Amino acid sequence: ELNVRKTLTSDEDETGISDLANDIRSNGLINPITVRQQGDKYEIIAGQRRYLACKLLNKPTIPCSIVNVSTQKAEELSLVENVQRNPMTNSDKIKTYSKLYEVYKKDIDKVISVVNISRITLTKYLKLNSLPEDVIKLLDASGETKITIEVAVELTKLPQDVDKLKLIKNIQTLKTSQQISAIKDFITQECTDADDINTIKE
């Protein structure tokens, strides 16, 4: 439940786990997974992909490092482990950085020391957490439906009642710079109906 990485069902992730399984078959599991005891079961804190790879190999057991930590500390360890290992999607980064921000009691300097990104970049990701999930997913989309971080940041400046997904779909054929300009004009003109962006972009 602690794991923030929620996109393990994609083809890319499945391929990655399959490759990891092949490596474990050849070289063994070099780093044990980290768990904590919860009742009569063990909860994975770090090592979800390694666990799934061993499961793919039908291994009956897996080496574990057992730690006795609070839920907050367990979540912190899980988040940090995700940041330091395989690249995450933008959606996962937004969730992970935002959770770390809460875990570290909104101490942005502490989060920066863990994720090793600039304050400006981290601040952008924290802002993006306020966007609807279906809009955040567009950051990881492909083709003309994909939006940039810069466009997404502009969307966070819109009033809460504006249908942001509908708005961005109305301007998805525009270049990034044109999308940003259209959103800025939408805000300046104090529009609230997402369809008003069609008049602005013309």
Image (tube, rainbow, N blue to C red):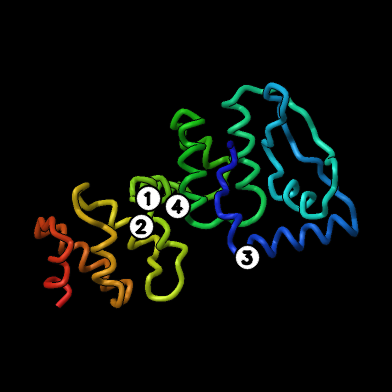
Mark 1 touching mark 2, by CB under 8 A?
A: no
Q: Which type of secondary structure does the marked residue at label 2 adopt?
A: helix
The amino acid at mark 3 is Glu
* Of callouts 3 and 2, the N-terminal one: 3
Per the image, the residue denoted by label 3 is 12
Local crowd at mark 2 within 10 Å, few (<14), some, or many (≥20)?
A: many
Q: Which residue is mark 1?
A: 128
Q: Is residue 90 left or right of residue 15?
A: left
**Of circles 1 and 4, which is in front?**
1
Residue type of the residue flagged with mark 2: Val
Image spot of residue 58 (x, y percent): 82, 51
Give the image quarter of residue 147. Answer: bottom left
At mark 1, the secondary structure is helix
Residue marked by disc 4: 121
Residue type, mark 4 in image:
Thr
Q: Which residue is mark 2?
A: 135
